[in-house]
Amino acid sequence: MINFTLKQLRYFEAVARHCHFGRAAAACAISQPALSSQIKELESALGLQLFERGARQVRLTPFGVQFRDRVRGILRDTEALAEMARSARDPLVGRLRVGIIPTIAPYLLPGVIGHITAAHPDIDLMVRETMTHRLIEELGDGRLDCAIVALPVSEPSLTEVALFDEAMVLVRPAADAQRPVPSVAALGQMKLLLLEEGHCFRDQALSFCNLRNTLPREGLDGSSLTTLVQMVGAGIGVTLIPEMAVPVETRSATVSIARLAPPFPKRTVGMVWRKTSALGPHLDVIAQHVRDAAAAHPAFAQAGSDPE
């Protein structure tokens, strides 16, 4: 009989996902030697090699590829069993793993955490910030319970719940504050600074301005909204940011904020989770806390209204 543990399977899946022992060990919060030892024990129990270990890269063996696919299914089923037990016991006690995209996390997360922990002090909230496609993958693998993203994600296996609509606002150099707000057509002809590829907010801005994602954009992309706003302050161009980012991102930048004429660009922020999740009915409660946090956000209070 072959004996191995769920812990070993989790370690194996982490190495298979990261293709690197050091990064996998960091993700699993253990030392690299301890992780390597567990993988060797797993390979010994199986009597087969799972990884080809090179000087700089780790690759799955042909058997390792087959093993990875089955292991991911086992881990998903294990998480589903844990969710079922938790839902039957008390769903709003214990660990809750929430994903959130970078264009929402710095601005909304403090309020979300405050609302959730005040109402449910026994929740152990774990937050993962990354781009939408990774959050969807981790939801599917059972590594997250839910995620706060821009909708739609159009993933048939996920429940989507809209939370609020949020305007995108134009950020210009401070010297442009008294100038007329450009039209959408004019905006498309300006130096429009955008987030780098992979961010859904980039795609939304391109879509609103009727620009193709394939246009040459050397020097016009940034890795964060902070970088974009600072570039605007330096006179490099203009950008669009979500309204909730305004209080944070404009504090230390010499810029002006303007609302575009209707129909102004906006995004729908929502929460998603697996349709098969046993926690599903209880995640509606968490979604309402996110709505409440958004309604209390300073940006929407300054604008004179709650998010739609």
Image (cartoon, helix red, strand yellow):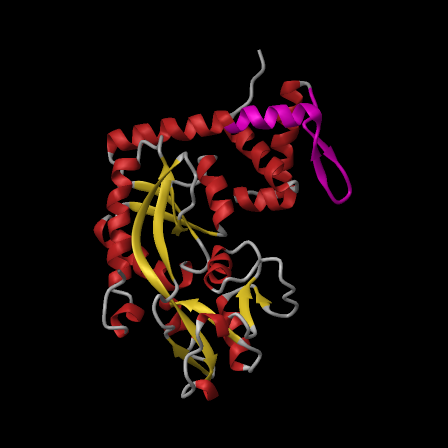
User: Residue at the spot x=60%, y=69% of the render?
Assistant: 220
> Percent from the top left, x then y, of residue 162?
31, 49
User: Does the segment drawn in magenta span residue 76?
Assistant: no
User: Residue at the spot x=43%, y=26% of the render?
Assistant: 77
- Give the magenta range: 48-72
Task: Name which quarter of the figure residue 92 lies in.
Answer: top left
> Percent from the top left, x then y, of residue 232?
52, 78
Q: Quadrant of the N terminus?
A: top right
> Percent from the top left, x then y, of residue 263?
35, 66
User: Residue at the spot x=65%, y=64% of the render?
Assistant: 216
Task: Name which quarter of the figure residue 66 lies in.
Answer: top right
> Percent from the top left, x then y, of residue 224?
52, 65
Task: Name which quarter of the figure residue 82 lies in.
Answer: top left
| Observer-nearest of 3 and 294 | 294
Judged left or right of residue 233, residue 216 is right
In this rendering, is residue 213 above or below 69? below
Q: Quadrant of the C terminus?
A: bottom left
In this rendering, is residue 180 above or below 197? below
User: Does the segment drawn in magenta span residue 60?
Assistant: yes
For the image, the number of numbered tags is 0
| Observer-nearest of 193 and 253 | 193
Residue ranking furthest to the top: 1
Judged left or right of residue 268, residue 63 is right
User: Residue at the spot x=45%, y=76% of the render?
Assistant: 171
In this rendering, is residue 84 above or below 47? below
| Observer-nearest of 281 and 303 | 303
Residue ranking furthest to the right: 55
